[in-house]
Amino acid sequence: MAIEAEKLSAAEALRKTRTFGKVRCHNPSCMERMEPSPGVAHIKCGTCGMEYRIYWVRPDLPRIRGPVWEVNRKIAAEALSSKLAASKIKSQIKEGVKDGVR
């Protein structure tokens, strides 16, 4: 049985997909990869706007410590107010249809 020179083990194949030095956004609807500049304390997701505190395990290995609460609360409040406004408009339209008035 001949051993193929280009055949990789599972660990070697996974190693090729690793993104060393990047972190992933913790927003479940986003999950975008972000690459912080070395030594920065915060990083902001370019897609959803969430901001995170960064901890550096080594000078080249970042990890997310947690969210920046002030920024994330503001984003959540804006999203909630837009959803409430949309549901209020829907209910007004529904009531108008029930009354037969448009």
Image (spheres, helix red, strand yellow):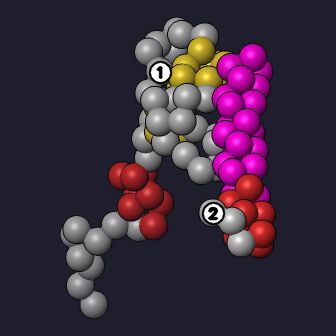
Residue appearing at x 77%, y 69% in the figure: 99
- Local crowd size for mark 1, using a 10 Å CA cut-off: few (<14), some (14–19), many (≥20): some
* Residue 66 at least partly seen: no
Report if residue 72 lies within the magenta region. yes
Q: Quadrant of residue 58?
A: top right
Q: Is residue 3 left or right of residue 99?
A: left
* Residue 12 at least partly seen: yes
Q: Nearer the viewer, residue 22 or 75?
A: 75
**Amino acid tagged 1:** Pro
Above or below — where is 8 with respect to 88? below
Report if residue 85 lies within the magenta region. yes
Q: Nearer the viewer, residue 85 or 29?
A: 85
Circles 1, 2 touching at the beta carbon (< 8 Å): no
Q: Nearer the viewer, residue 85 or 37?
A: 85
Kindly identify which residue carries mark 1: 36
- Local crowd size for mark 2, using a 10 Å CA cut-off: few (<14), some (14–19), many (≥20): few
Residue appearing at x 76%, y 26% in the figure: 73
